Amino acid sequence: MNQEEYPHTKYFDWSDLKTHLQSVKVPIDRDIRTYPTPIAGWDGLFNFLLEERTKISKELIRLEKLSDQSLEAGEKMRAIDEFVRSSEFLGGDAP
């Protein structure tokens, strides 16, 4: 196993992925809590924040299910790589 084979394995463990997703979710949760009362026709940002929070929550649930599986090292790295590539919040330039 190497970086060329699994390019998205800068996340070496499920907990790294969970930590990153939670760090993305925290400011969205904060923005939703502190968002002013929506004004009819002007609440597009609020709806966007709700959608983003839902997407991250679904990814955290999917991650939890994957991390509960008993996988050998190679399978685990492959699963992490596939998870990261399919994630809207982890792929590409995510830290």
Image (cartoon, helix red, strand yellow):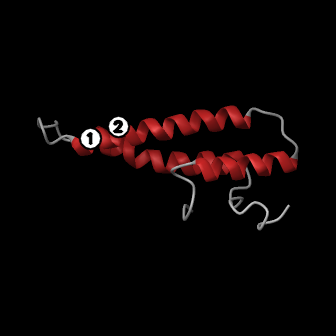
> In the image, residue 37 lies at what x, y percent?
16, 36
Residue at x 84%, y 39% (from the top left corner): 71
Q: Residue furthest bottom?
A: 4
Q: Secondary structure at mark 2?
A: helix
Compared across the picture, whether 82 is left or right of 74 comes to left
> In the image, residue 18 lies at what x, y percent?
61, 45
> In the image, residue 20 lies at what x, y percent?
56, 51
CA distance separating discs 2 and 1? 6 Å
Residue at x 65%, y 34% (from the top left corner): 64
Q: Residues within 10 Å of mark 1 (few under 14, many from 20)?
A: some
Q: Identify the amino acid type marked 2.
A: Leu
Q: Identify the amino acid type marked 1.
A: Phe
The quarter in which the N terminus is drawn is bottom right
Q: Which residue is mark 2?
A: 50
The quarter in which the C terminus is drawn is bottom right
Compared across the picture, whether 37 is left or right of 86 comes to left
Q: Residues within 10 Å of mark 2 (few under 14, many from 20)?
A: some
Residue at x 56%, y 39% (from the top left corner): 59
Q: In the picture, residue 68 is in which quadrant? A: top right
Residue at x 72%, y 59% (from the top left corner): 9
Q: In the picture, residue 29 is in which quadrant? A: top left
Q: How many marks?
A: 2
Q: Residue furthest left?
A: 40
Q: Which residue is mark 1?
A: 46
| CB atoms of marks 2 and 1 within 8 Å | yes
Q: Secondary structure at mark 1?
A: helix
The disc placed on residue 27 is none
Compared across the picture, whether 30 is left or right of 25 comes to left
Q: In the picture, residue 65 is in which quadrant? A: top right
Quick one: 62 or 36, which is closer to the camera? 62
